[in-house]
Amino acid sequence: MMDLPTQPEMLLSFVNTALRDEFESLEDLAFYYDADPDAIEKTLAGIHYVYDPERNRFI
């Protein structure tokens, strides 16, 4: 299994694509990649993106 990207812009692209194509929630994605969903949200908040669970993507 691969690690999630560390650069925020790359992480955003990767996560939104994975949420669209493979996972029903951020928690599912984080569990699969053994990652902390709060850390993902914090990283992406640094570039002004927030997770929208209704859309299942960062906006």
Image (tube, rainbow, N blue to C red):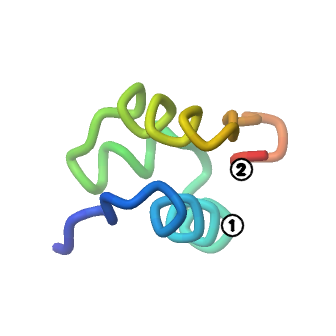
Question: Which element carries disc 1, helix, strand or loop?
Answer: helix
Vertical position of residue 44 compared to residue 42: above or below? below
Question: Which label's residue is closer to the chain start, 1 or 2?
Answer: 1
Q: Position of residue 18 (x, y in %)?
A: 54, 68
Q: Nearer the viewer, residue 59 or 20?
A: 59
Of 4 and 6, which appears nearest the observer? 6
Identify the image quadrant of residue 6. Answer: bottom left
Residue drawn where x is 36% and y is 45% of the image: 30
Above or below residue 59? Residue 2 is below
Left or right of 12 in this view: 4 = left
Q: Which numbered circle lies on residue 31?
A: none
- Left or right of 31? Residue 23 is right
User: What residue would you read off at disc 2?
Assistant: 57
Instruction: Measure the alpha-carbon separation of dots 1 and 2.
Output: 7 Å
Query: Which amino acid is tagged 1?
Result: Arg
Residue picked out by circle 1: 20
Amino acid under disc 2: Arg
Query: Where is residue 39 drawn, in percent x and y?
Result: 36, 31
Give residue 27's position: percent from left, percent from top.
Answer: 46, 37
Furthest-front residue in this view: 47
Helix, strand or loop under label 2: strand
Q: Are marks 1 and 2 in contact (CB under 8 Å)?
A: yes
